[in-house]
């Protein structure tokens, strides 16, 4: 199987046109250097751009179905090859977990070059359901489509909940970025449907945990393993399963804990953990306490190395944020605190604490 790379703004129109090729998708409108880096490393045989199709003699990758890659915020991207069997395993689990059928309708808003959007396009194709593709900017106006389910990062779901009316919605799935407790409550009220927090990563073909649709949805957790084995070793989440990039157990580098009912909770990346005066603190725990104490916060991120740093959005005085942080711990009194219009994100739409440290140092 040779590789085709889609570098167009409407990859869904090409998604099923190259069944004899393994598929990778890149953002055509992203950073020029980033795009070239990806193309240099994907060893493509076909490249689809707005200018047409380019051919060259790339490698052969056997039963490979798709290629995913990490956002590269902590260095160069990692590339992961998945076979038809692995992709089908994930697709079947998602369909079974959410009881998806051909009668469902999916509003696709995540970019297909993002693993989140890429794998779900296989889901809707396999289930034979109707799908309507929109860009996040399109959500500012009412969409003439009534989905039965949606899936996106929390920020996009919040925009959706404030601008759209979805009377037929069965559930909204949140993935790729941690869902703050405050956002969970807001989304549940606005959508009037279950909010399903899930978890996946490029190293596991994008999906490996979910809260149950028909069962208890535990706020602040990623739910239960879905078609994968999971373990916590020395505070770190380890995974093994048929959809993983390796047959062996591997360390996700995510700090995690498991409650008495078996639900898993991500506490943050090992590299993001704050060390202040020799005390180790979990940033997600601090952020959730801020959301609970200051409902007016739209978004808040804490980060730093040997000093507490914090940026936030929302109609809140810096003195309020500082007071709550100091109440949490005297170690949390921020050395840098800023109210910003928007918190910077990486190419995958995620907040990188490492990048924020570099930006605000």
Image (cartoon, grey):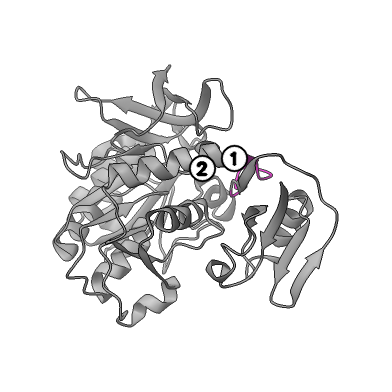
| Contact? badges 1 and 2 (CB < 8 Å) | yes
From the top left corner, tell me how far across and down residue 58 is, in percent: 82, 51
Q: Does 261 appear in magenta?
A: no
Which element carries disc 1, helix, strand or loop? strand
Q: Quadrant of residue 261?
A: top left
Count the marks: how many? 2
Which residue is denoted by mark 1 in the rendering? 82
Report the magenta residues as a range.
71-82
* Picture disc at residue 87: 2
- The first of marks 1 and 2 along the sequence is 1
Q: Nearer the viewer, residue 102 or 70?
A: 102
Q: Dot 1 surroundings within 10 Å: few (below 14), some, or many (20 or more)? A: many
Relative side of 254 to 102, left or right: right
Q: In this rendering, is residue 210 above or below 172?
A: above
Q: Quadrant of residue 49?
A: bottom right
Residue at image coords 54%, 54%: 360
Q: In this rendering, is residue 227 above or below 339?
A: above
């Amino acid at each position: 199987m040779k590789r085709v790379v889609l570098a167009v703004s409407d990859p869904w129109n090409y998604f099923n046109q190259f069944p004899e090729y393994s598929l990778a998708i890149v953002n055509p409108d992203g950073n020029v250097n980033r795009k070239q880096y990806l193309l240099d490393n994907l060893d493509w045989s076909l490249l689809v751009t707005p200018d047409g199709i380019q051919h060259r003699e790339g490698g052969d990758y056997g039963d490979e179905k798709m290629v995913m890659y990490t956002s590269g915020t902590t260095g160069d991207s990692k590339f992961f090859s998945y076979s038809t069997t692995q992709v089908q395993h994930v697709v079947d689990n998602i369909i079974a977990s959410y009881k998806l059928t051909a009668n469902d309708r999916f509003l696709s808003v995540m970019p297909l070059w993002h693993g989140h959007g890429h794998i779900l396009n296989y889901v809707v194709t396999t289930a034979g359901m109707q799908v309507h593709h929109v860009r996040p900017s399109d959500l500012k106006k009412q969409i003439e489509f009534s989905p039965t389910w949606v899936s996106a990062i929390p920020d996009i779901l919040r925009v959706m909940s404030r601008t759209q009316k979805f009377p037929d919605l069965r559930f909204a799935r949140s993935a790729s970025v941690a869902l703050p407790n405050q956002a969970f409550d807001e989304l549940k009220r606005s959508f009037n449907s279950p909010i399903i927090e899930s978890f996946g990563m490029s190293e596991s073909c994008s999906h490996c945990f979910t809260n149950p649709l028909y069962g208890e949805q535990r706020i602040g957790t990623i739910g239960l393993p879905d078609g994968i084995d999971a373990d916590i070793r020395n505070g770190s989440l380890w995974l093994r399963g048929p959809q993983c990039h390796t047959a062996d157990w591997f360390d996700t580098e995510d700090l995690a804990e498991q409650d008495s009912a078996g639900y898993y909770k991500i506490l943050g990346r090992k590299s993001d953990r704050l060390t202040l005066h020799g005390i180790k603190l979990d940033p997600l725990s601090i952020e959730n306490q801020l959301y609970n104490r200051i409902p007016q916060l739209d978004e808040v991120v804490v980060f730093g190395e040997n000093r507490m740093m914090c940026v936030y959005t929302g109609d809140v005085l810096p003195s309020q944020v500082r007071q709550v942080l100091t109440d949490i711990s005297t170690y949390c009194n921020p050395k840098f605190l800023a109210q910003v219009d928007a918190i910077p994100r990486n190419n995958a739409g995620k907040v990188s604490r490492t990048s924020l440290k570099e930006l605000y140092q």
